[in-house]
Amino acid sequence: MGPRANMKKSGYEDIEAGKNKFVPLSSLAVLLIPYFWPRGIVLKLQVAVSLSLVAASRSFRVLSPLYLKDATNELASTGAVPYRPLALYCGALFLSTTAKQIQTYSYLRVKQHAYIDVSAAVFAHLHKMSMHFHLTKKTGKVMRVLDRGLDSTDSVVNVLFFRFLPTLLEVAAVSLVFACAFQDHWLSVVAVTSVVLYTVVTFIGTTIRLEFKAQSNQHDNDANDKAVDSFTNFETVKAFNAEEYETNRYMASIEQCQHTTYLTRGYLNGLTVAQQFIQSTCLFVCMAITGVKVTQGLLTVGDFVAVGSYILNIFKPLDSLGAIYNTIVQAVVDMSNLVELVEATPDILDKDDAAALVVASTPMAAMSPGTRRRHQPTVQFDHVGFTYPGQPASNGLKNICFTIPPGHTVAIVGTTGAGKSTLSRLLFRFYDVTAGRILINGQDISCVQQKSLRQVLGIVPQDAVMFNDTIYYNVRDGCMHAARASATTIGHMQSRRWLGTELVLLSEFAQVGVLVVQIQYGRQSATRADVEAAAAAANLTAFVATLPLGLDTKVGERGLKLSGGEKQRVAIARAILKNPRIMVLDEATSALDTRTERCIYEELQRICADRTTMVIAHRLSTIQHADDIVVLDHGSMVERGAHDELLARNGGTVLVCYECLGYHCRRADARHAALTPVCVAYAAMWAAQLTTRADNVPPLTAGSPPRIS
């Protein structure tokens, strides 16, 4: 049983694939709100100042040709240098540029805060998504969607609201000048018609390029995904001499991307020629109309010069209209993908009336040994059923019922795929049960806040996950670094819901990995002495002593600089440091050698003593001490009892561990003829033990070879 097996296509895969879907404009608008209605009165004033400066800049551009007209007329009529109109003309140009530069700098702070708000909210939303979401997408593609969406939002604000729309307003103002100052409506008609035709041709030509741009995005996504997969699995690539194969796959995607880019460029060049033709025709017609009126004495030479200046001024920003439209279209695609990502609803949500999980508030260290056990929480699986999305019900958990009393240890054993690790995922509420319920101290975990639930849970996973930082961080400190960097943003955004999501807590938000940090991740408030004590308890001291930087040694991406056993010891130290009320050991010592396993296992037994513990195991050495053992087979509970009770049941199912051969455990029955001789020998000897009940027959222990007579 596993979450990845037999998964059907989900809505998340559209996000992963980067499909170019357009969402309603109202949905896109929520990404733009922080850019025009930011938090804080100071930022709102900066927005108002920026918009005023844009208006001022365009106003000076509209006035400048009128001053040029006066200068030309004065020069033609008097023959004297027109100092005043020339000064006004040059001053208007200077003030127009200066206002634009001040606006750009003033608005930069608004854009930075908006970018932080949007990116933090999306990042937090991704952390709120369920495990199913993160198992049905590829991280590289989702991060590309995130990066492109954020950059595109910034681009839309720049090109649409601070370039294109002000240009349209300038065209309207110039039309009024033509009609009023020059008293010629035909100039206005020609100018407006040319601008409209220019815009329509640009939009049509750019729309044709949209399909090629979408294909280019897809090929770019594929190339990026292949590169991420290749470098993430570089050890496997090298082991199978597949460097050339991976390079060819990557190059094929790059070549496809470049081909579609080439076609897109061809359309752009043709569009530029058409735009220039419209602009030149408009300039010719307007100046011809003005020239005729100059010869008739209706207009002056200054008017002729001013009209030419106006036409050039209104078309100058439109020269890049194709690029602007292309940017907007691409940005809408990228923003749509980002909005689709943000609007993906988490499968696991706190109920509106969810309360915090109630457990004993007294720290374990403050409890006396005699009272410690009874103050621990009770865990109950009440007729639990569960099926992973996309899997048939026959592959899921069925009617699982057992209770872990306060301070007791229950072992979950069974064959690979029986559903052992699924129980731990359900306990952490990474998934919701499809039948029954899970209770802690009588409280249904689906009715309590997820944060409070996971505060009382600790886990040592079989596959220890490391962050690309120090050992110290991976146990404790990384969250503190990220918290300091993000505290201001998070503080401002705690109550914001304009993206349809709430921010997660810093402990969930900040995830980054040096050795001491890897350990300190378990409890961010821990001191260095606490981290060192946890490392010692996990038998890391000798290993850390061999490192030049000790706990401050970086472990590499996913902890690749550490061996499997070293990573698992870091994970154990992390759990020890967290000191949870409920401990889950998911094959916690599977990657350790026998000697290290014995040392750590003794420490784990000490730490888990009088602590509610669930042990997921394959090996007998990790379950013999358990108060109760639950045997799973194909999602069903087939046996339950203490170790001795299971041995005392005639004909019962036995778990055989191939310690001497290094195999995982499997179900074995002494009457099964198809089993290997070693399995039969183990099962037969266990059956002999329960039949003879002889005190002189020593029990089998982990690592013992089969005693075959």
Image (cartoon, rainbow, N blue to C red):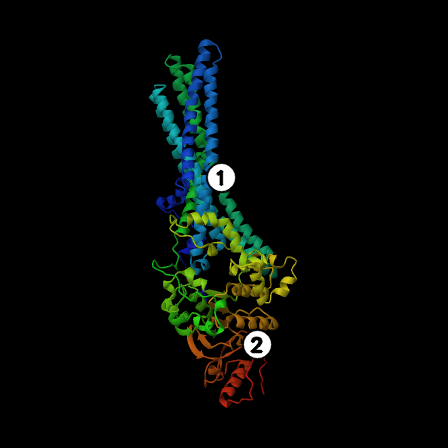
Which residue sits at x=42%, y=33%?
49
CA distance separating discs 2 and 1: 65 Å
Is any atom of residue 198 visible in this view?
Answer: no
Q: Secondary structure at mark 2?
A: loop
Label 2 vs label 1, nearer the camera: 2
Task: Name the spot of residue 204 as percent of width and height, x first.
Answer: 40, 37
Which residue, given by chain and number where applicable, does mark 1 sit on? 265
- Residue extending furthest toward the top: 78
Which residue sits at x=50%, y=71%?
608
Tell me which amino acid carries mark 1: Arg
The correct choice, above or below, for 503 with respect to 176 in the image is below
Q: Residues within 10 Å of mark 2 (few under 14, many from 20)?
A: some
Task: Name the spot of residue 248 as percent of width and height, x first.
Answer: 57, 53
Q: Secondary structure at mark 1?
A: helix
Which residue, given by chain and number where applicable, does mark 2 sit on? 659
Residue 652, picture quadrant:
bottom left
Closer to us: 653 or 292: 653
Task: Name the spot of residue 193 as percent of width and height, x first.
Answer: 36, 28
Could you tell me which quadrant the N terminus lies in? bottom left
Is tag 2's residue or tag 1's residue first in the polypeptide sequence? 1
